[in-house]
Image: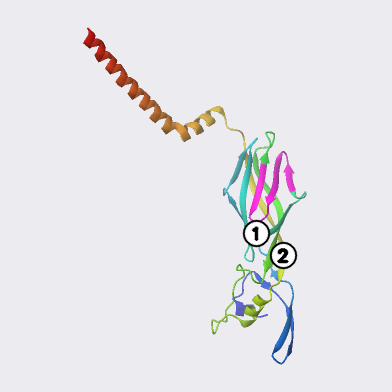
Amino acid sequence: MDLDLIHSPSNYGLSFYTSESSKSNEVRDYTSWIAALPPAINILTEPKNIVLRQGEEQLVFSEFETSLSNNVTSITFDNGSNYSFEGLNVSVKRFHPTLFKIHVSPQSSVGVYDIPLVASMLIQTTSSKLPVFNDPVTGNTNPEFQISKKYPTIDYITTKANLTIEVLPPLTLSETFMGYWHTWGDAVALIVAGAVGAFATFAMDLLKKQKGII
């Protein structure tokens, strides 16, 4: 295959086929879709940086992106379907879209954990993620590529990635107070100011009444 004709991409897919023709009829047999080379996975998480404190638990939404697919079919860790190390536990609650459940025990060590995983992604000839290669001279889409869309085939790419999690110590009493004040400080100050103003008004009215009696 002349890669120059498809602009020499760093990643691309291959599908081979055989065909038999008789007059105006044609039969084609396509192989599974093959990724060359297996693309790297980019893991997008919400929140972007996964930070938990000792004793916390959190659900983290994720997207697995490659140049050929974003359809995750399986995720495994080095020691199986769940990851567990020093009280840090990670499990997959859903594949697509991906949802991780992360639990940090109070005894987990503080630090950054780079958790290796292996993800399997579904690729298929009808996927919108696959690039469309046009003829460099005419600008038209290669008719063979269009035909391959009519005979969809699938395959899987399996590649490695890392999920990064940072574990912090629990909040101190002063940090907890500061966090509370940062969230509710303005509201509390407004309530207190209103209460003080109301009390001042009441005190002035009471003082006026007392003067009137005297």
SS assignment at label 1:
loop
What is the span of residues highlighted in magenta in the rendered image? 82-102
Between discs 1 and 2, the one toward the N terminus? 1
- Where residue 39 sits in the image (x, y, percent)? 66, 64
Above or below: residue 155 compared with residue 116: below
Q: CA distance from mark 1 to mark 2?
A: 13 Å
The residue drawn where x is 69% and y is 69% is 35
Q: Amino acid at mark 1?
A: Ile
At 64% from the left and 48% from the top, the residue drawn is: 164
Residue closer to the observer: 70 or 173 = 70
The x and y percentages for residue 163 are 66, 50
**Contact, mark 1 vs mark 2 (Cβ under 8 Å):** no
Give the residue pinned by disc 2: 156
* Between marks 1 and 2 in the image, the one whose residue lies nearer the viewer: 2
Residue underneath mark 1:
41
Q: Residue furthest bottom?
A: 23
Q: Quadrant of the C terminus?
A: top left
